[in-house]
Image: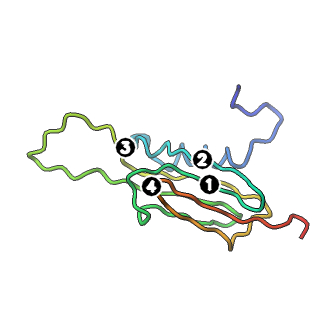
């Protein structure tokens, strides 16, 4: 499956935002958190976003709504402080910043956004209304 946009077709606004965020705002040396995986599903009357962000406290994660219906999820895991007597054998856990943005549909209710975090999983819900009115 080719992930490129065919010539002559319009790219998804979500993909454009994702590309801009992943290439210009986040340093490449930030490892695992840069690639924070987020699922987005739509069920009747609500959009649900789930992000795996183990090891972060809810105070270290920001959920914001920007102008033009953009949901922004960001955070940072700091590098563990080292003592000069520490002798590290392996460092696999990532540190650094992450930022993901999603353009919400026209019928999303910006005043009905809820976020919760449990067992390293952030869940954001955004209610939606009728498109007719």
Position of 58 relative to 85 (above/below): below
Q: Residue under circle 3? A: 94
Place of residue 63 in the rendered image (x, y in percent of width and height, measured from the top left): 54, 64
Q: Quadrant of the C terminus?
A: bottom right
Place of residue 28 in the rendered image (x, y in percent of width and height, measured from the top left): 44, 40
- Give the Cα distance between marks 3 and 4: 18 Å
Residue at position x 26%, y 51% in the image: 80
Of labels 1 and 4, the one closer to you: 4
Q: Residue under circle 2? A: 20
Mark 2 surroundings: few (<14), some (14-19) or many (≥20) residues within 10 A: few
Q: Nearer the viewer, residue 68 or 50?
A: 50
- Identify the mark nearer the N-term, 3 or 2: 2
The kind of secondary structure element at disc 1 is: strand
Mark number for residue 119? 4
Residue at position x 40%, y 56% in the image: 56
Q: Are marks 3 and 2 in contact (CB under 8 Å)?
A: no
Q: Residue under circle 1? A: 49
Mark number for residue 8? none
Mark 4 surroundings: few (<14), some (14-19) or many (≥20) residues within 10 A: few
Q: Quadrant of the N terminus?
A: top right
- Give the Cα distance between marks 4 and 2: 30 Å
Of labels 4 and 2, the one closer to you: 4
The kind of secondary structure element at disc 3 is: loop
Seen in the image, is 33 located left or right of residue 23? Answer: left
- Give the Cα distance between marks 1 and 2: 20 Å
Mark 3 surroundings: few (<14), some (14-19) or many (≥20) residues within 10 A: some
Q: Nearer the viewer, residue 85 or 123?
A: 123
- Give the Cα distance between marks 1 and 4: 15 Å
């Amino acid at each position: 499956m080719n992930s490129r946009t065919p010539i002559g077709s319009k790219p998804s606004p979500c993909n454009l935002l994702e590309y801009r965020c992943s290439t210009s705002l986040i340093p490449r040396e930030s490892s695992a958190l840069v690639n924070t995986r987020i699922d987005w599903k739509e069920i009747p009357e609500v959009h649900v976003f789930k992000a795996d962000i183990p090891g972060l406290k809810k105070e270290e994660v920001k959920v914001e709504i920007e102008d033009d219906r953009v949901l922004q999820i960001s955070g940072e895991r700091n590098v563990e402080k080292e003592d000069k007597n520490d002798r590290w054998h392996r460092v696999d856990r990532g540190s650094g910043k992450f930022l993901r943005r999603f353009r919400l549909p026209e019928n999303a209710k910006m005043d009905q956004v809820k976020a919760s975090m449990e067992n390293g999983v952030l869940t954001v819900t955004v209610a939606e209304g009728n498109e007719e009115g």
